[in-house]
Amino acid sequence: MTPTLLAAGAPALPHTASNGQLLLAVLLSIGAIVLLITRFKLHPFLALTLGSGLLAAVAGAPFDKLLASFSTGFGSTVASVGLLIGLGAMLGKLLADSGGANTIADTVLARTGPKLLPWAMALIAAVLGLPLFFEVGVVLLVPIVLLVARRGNAPLIGIGIPALAGLSVLHGLVPPHPGPLVAVDALHADLGVTLALGLLIAVPTLIVAGPLFGRLAQRWVGPLELPAETAPVDTVKRERTPKFGAVLATILLPVVLMLGKALADVVIDDPKATGQRIFDFIGSPLIALLAATLLAMLTLGRAAGFDKGKISDTVGSALGPIAGIVFIVGAGGGFKQTLIDVGVGQAVSEWSGKWHISALLLGWLIAVLIRLATGSATVATITAAGIVGPLAAGMSTSHAALLVLAIGAGSLFLSHVNDAGFWLVKEYFGMSVGQTLKSWSVMETIISVVAIALILPLSLII
């Protein structure tokens, strides 16, 4: 079982609010969060914290109970998801600093012809995107994209869009990225099943939004001027670099372990069996990522010639930049707990029954609206998961996992000017706002729509 976001004995907020009052509380609190983030440029951590207070106040909950509820949600989220975010950051930092990313890129590109370059870039981005946060992946991949465009005389958008699509699809749909992890915990979904179904949805979504749409985006945007000089990701020339097989095995280890646990749950299906208990242990997210991080110290760090001190410094330096992410996710957990404890989740469950709307579609729509308003995929995922969480209570394992994916798909919809990723892509590729909207923003929308279009019929089959 994955760690749940709700701590044992979490305090409930006593309330006598009607469904109409709860709806007003939700709208005002989310509206306040959107306004604080977009208009007043307040940090999302503070905005989510203040939004939780407003939610409880409008719903009529006592503030002493609010503090206990918010603290419970914050603490349990950081305790479960924060550990995984930290380990993923360490693994990504070792991959970047050791030159392992270059090893994968050079190996794949050396075996790829000009016509297959977009597909190769999508593959590279997807593999590198497994352990990397989106922003880190962009910084890591852009120099590779520019280098490939120059060497292969290829259009920048034609290979850039597949690379960005690979990163974005993994970021929104596949654990151990923060958004999917939080949704897995909030909905009590099985991480291994979510990972397996996420990869199943991610592959066709990436094909459509990446190499296929890249051709169309190339015509829409036109040729882009490459910078005068491009440099590989790792500018330090080293005598030793990690081997391709070792790098690939290290990146895929946590995925294999978690998928192995999911498969054992289906094949063995006996919690007392020794084989089942072994797979449950080694396939748990914490152990799987810890094993990959420890292995990376050898296969990436030592292979690149790092001594013990350098490896320690590299791993330690990965934690500072993710502090903001951990606090945002933690505050989102507090907001989600407040939503549940004031009774919003139960009210949504009643409304969805009256409206006869699919829980998957409802989760996607809520995430889309919050994404459009705040520009943050993580905030959209956290809030939507908190609102529709009670709907997952009676779901099967596979449908709870699909609800996680539906929310993740909605959180990627139409990145525009209120999204930091929009400006990151614009500046790195030297595009105008209009060009970025026609390429990056449309690509994100395609990912969201194609993913939910695959998720809904899949829910009827499994």
Image (cartoon, rainbow, N blue to C red):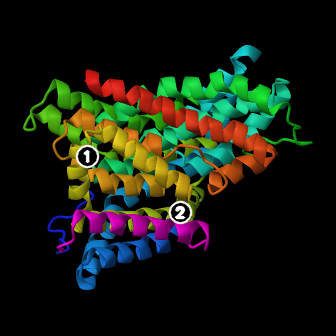
Secondary element under disc 2, as helix, strand or loop, is helix
Q: Nearer the viewer, residue 361 or 177?
A: 361
Q: Nearer the viewer, residue 46 or 437?
A: 437
Within 10 Å of the Cα at label 1, are there few (<14), some (14-19), or many (20+) other Cα atoms?
some
Q: Which residue is mark 2?
A: 316
Q: Residue at x 26, y 53 (%)?
A: 348
Drawn side of residue 226 relative to residue 103, left or right: right
Drawn side of residue 280 relative to residue 259, left or right: left
Rounded to the nearest angstrom, the CA distance separating label 2 from label 1 is 46 Å
Q: Is residue 391 visible?
A: yes
CB within 8 Å, label 2 to label 1: no
Q: Is residue 439 magenta?
A: no
Secondary element under disc 1, as helix, strand or loop, is helix
Q: Which residue is mark 1?
A: 352
The residue sitting at the right extreme is: 228
The tag earlier along the polypeptide, 2 or 1, is: 2
Residue 400 screen position, x and y as percent? 26, 40
Q: Main secondary structure of the magenta part?
A: helix
Q: Nearer the viewer, residue 306 or 48?
A: 48
Q: Residue at x 21, y 64 (%)?
A: 7
Q: Quadrant of the N terminus?
A: top left
Amino acid on which the number 2 mark rests in the picture: Gly
Residue 274 screen position, x and y as percent? 12, 35
Residue 208 screen position, x and y as percent? 57, 24
| Number of marks present in the image shown | 2
- Start and end of the magenta stretch? 15-43
Q: Is residue 128 visible?
A: no
Quadrant of the image occupied by residue 457: top left
Amino acid on which the number 1 mark rests in the picture: Ser
Quadrant of the image occupied by residue 201: top left
